[in-house]
Amino acid sequence: DAGITQSPRHKVTETGTPVTLRCHQTENHRYMYWYRQDPGHGLRLIHYSYGVQDTNKGEVSDGYSVSRSNTEDLPLTLESAASSQTSVYFCASSVAGATDTQYFGPGTRLTVL
Amino acid sequence: AQTVTQSQPEMSVQEAETVTLSCTYDTSESDYYLFWYKQPPSRQMILVIRQEAYKQQNATENRFSVNFQKAAKSFSLKISDSQLGDAAMYFCAYRSSGSRLTFGEGTQLTVNP
């Protein structure tokens, strides 16, 4: 398994507050991704990055932002948390892009009250 | 857009028996990759097996094997000699060079002692 850590593992916050979820990988993977997992939807891509200073929107990017200032980290920011963003969030990384295997972090359970 | 369908929300198997999880996908691409991921109660997403579409030979990993039917766009996972530790949610996923990783909704596997 790739060395991917996420913090915090659990977070409860209130509607309207900013939240940052952190993802750190020690595998020197160039590609990083953020997904959310909800019942009935499987995993859906929020944002992804193909390298430092590169970020791209996924299929459910509204209300989220990311920045990539180094290879190891891809923090996910919720500028103003909404109850609809209550979910389990997974970070993933891969060596290469399109067809390479993605390795996942342990997940962060976020509850927005 | 590519879609991945897992038609079995839940499956159960007796310990030491064999179970097959179904997955179908829709694509117009000829070159793509298919994956099965396992998510145990710990929530960690773990790669089980990977299949390249250009390979006719079905992938195998110890007790896990796939039945890849490219013409039928079917990619089932067979677990032989099921163990209690195999109990988890299993996700089928698809990716091509022109698309991001797309997941099915998952199949919850229960292993009965």
Image (cartoon, grey):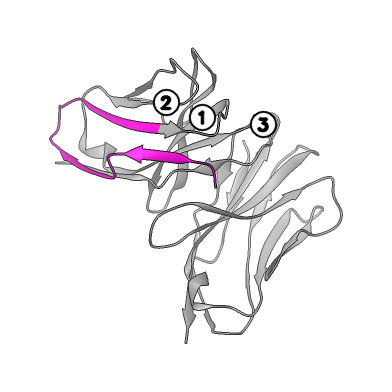
User: In the figure, residue A19 lies in which quadrant?
Assistant: top left
In this view, the residue farthest toward the front is: A26
Residue at label 1? A32
Q: Chain of mark 3?
A: A
Disc 2: CA contacts within 10 A as few (<14), some (14-19) or many (>=20): many
Q: CA distance from mark 2 to mark 3?
A: 18 Å
The percent position of residue B76, horizontal first and vertical second, equals: 68, 63
In the picture of the structure, the residue carrying the numbered disc 3 is A98
Instruction: Please state which amino acid type lies under the numbered disc 2.
Output: Leu
Q: Are marks 1 and 2 in contact (CB under 8 Å)?
A: yes
Horizontally, is A64 left or right of B96 in the view? left
Magenta residue span: A1-23
* Residue B103, above or below B69: above
Indicate the chain on which mark 1 is placed: A
Q: Looking at the image, is mark 1 or mark 3 earlier in the sequence?
A: 1
Q: Residue at x 76, y 58 (%)?
A: B59
Neighbor class of circle 1 (other Cα within 10 Å; few <14, some 14-19, many 20+) is: many
Q: CA distance from mark 1 to mark 3?
A: 12 Å
Q: Does A70 sit above or below residue A10?
A: above
A4 falls in the magenta region: yes
| Residue A14: image location, x then y, percent | 12, 35
Secondary structure under badge 2? loop
In x, y percent, where is residue B106?
50, 58
Label 1 and label 2: CA atoms lie apart by 7 Å
Per the image, the residue denoted by label 2 is: A74
Q: Amino acid at mark 1?
A: Met
Considering the numbered disc 1 on the image, is that residue within a helix, a strand or a loop? strand
Q: Residue at x 79, y 58 (%)?
A: B69
Q: Please report the residue visible at 42 percent of the width from the left and 26 percent of the height from the top.
A: A74
Q: Quadrant of the N terminus of chain B?
A: top right
Front tag of 1 and 3: 1
